[in-house]
Image (tube, rainbow, N blue to C red):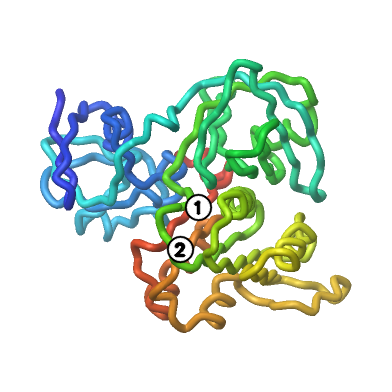
Amino acid sequence: MTFQVTISPSGRQFNCDSDETVLAAALRAGLILPYGCKNGACGSCKGKVSSGQVVHGNHQQKALSDEEEAQGGALFCCAKPQSDLSIEAREMLADDDYPIKKLPSRIAKLEKLSDDVMLIELQLPANEKLNYRAGQYIEFLLKDGKRRSYSLANAPHIDGPLSLHVRHMPGGYFTDQVFSTVKERDIMRFEGPQGSFYLREESDKPVILLASGTGFAPIKAIVEHLIHIDSKRSIHLYWGGRRPQDLYMQSLCEDWASKLEDFQYTPVISDAKNEDNWNGRTGFVHQAVVDDYADLSTYQVYACGAPIVVESAKRDFVAKSQLPADEFYADAFTSEADLTKN
C-alpha cells in the first residue's frame, strides 16, 4: 500500500510505500531530510509525526526514547507509514550535481596515522568521478549485505584518491579486516555520497568546528574546502580526544592556525596521563566551546564524532550559548557495536 507524506513547513509531498522508510521514500522523490547513519543509531533524522501513524524498526533508545516516540517523535530512517502522514522536518531539494552512485575502487594506500587509526586512499576507475560536498560520507558495500560508513577526509576539489580515516574497533567485522587482512590494490565497492552533513557555503556566519576522534575526517574536508574557496569566514576548530595521541593530525591543525588568517585551533584532552606531559586544555571538548563562547547566536556549528559528544554539544550550545538550533549541523559516528544491535 502507498501513502502520501506531507512535510511541514514546506508543504512538499511524496509517496511512501508501507514497506519502505520515510527517509528512503523522500530520497527517492528527490528530497533530502537530515540523516546520518540510516540505521536508527545516531538520531540525525529525528523529526515529528504531527498526524498519521508510523511503525519503527529496531533503533537505539539514545536516538529516540519511548517518551519521545509517545509524543510524536520519529526516526525517519526506520519509520514506515501505516497511513497518510504529516511530518515536521527540515528538508532541501536534492541536487543533480551530486548523484548517489555505486562504484568500484582500488585501495591505493594504507597508512597508520596512529596505533588505531588507518588512512585508506581509494582510487576510482579512470572514467569515474565522485561529486560530493565537504563533510559527506560513503558506505562500503560488504559481504552479506553489510555496510560500513566513513566520512571523506579530503575536500571535493582535490584530485587523486578519496581519503578515509578508519579507527580500529577490536572485534569489529570491518575494522579488524582493515588492520589485518586488507591490503593495497584490493578492490572495494561503495555507495555515495551520503548524508546531509556538509558545509553551507551560502552563509557568511563565523564557524565553530567541533570534532572528537576520527570525527576530524569530515571536519578536515570542510577546512580544506573553506581554504579552497578563499572563504573570509572566521573559523575556530576544537578537536577532542582521550589522550594526545588521539589527535593524530595535530601538526596539520597547528599549521593551519599558523598560516591562515582568522583561524584558531584548540585541542582538548579528556583523560591525559602524567606521562603524556599534556599542558593544553582538558575536559570535554564541547565544554571548552561553552567556556569560550557565551554567545553563539551569530554562529554556525559543524560537529562530528561520538553521539554523546554531538548530543551534549547541541543541548548546551542551544541552552547556554544561544546558538539557533537550525544552525547546528552534525554527523554522529556510530560504532559497529551500534550496528549489530539493529
- Residue at image coords 13%, 33%: 4
Identify the image quadrant of residue 188: top right
Mark 1 crowd level (few <14, some 14–19, many ≥20, 10 Å Cα): many
Mark drawn on residue 311: 2
Residue type at mark 2?
Answer: Glu
Between residues 267 and 263, which one lies in front from this camera angle?
263
Mark drawn on residue 332: 1
Position of 25 compared to 316: left or right? left
Upstream in sequence: badge 1 or badge 2: 2
* Residue 29, visible in the rendered structure: yes
Mark drawn on residue 105: none
State whether residue 284 is above or below residue 54: below
State whether residue 234 is above or below residue 148: below
For the N terminus, the quadrant is top left
Q: CA distance from mark 1 to mark 2?
A: 8 Å
Q: Where does the image place residue 124, in percent across and percent down from the top left?
A: 64, 22
State whether residue 174 is above or below residue 316: above
Position of 35 compared to 333: left or right? left
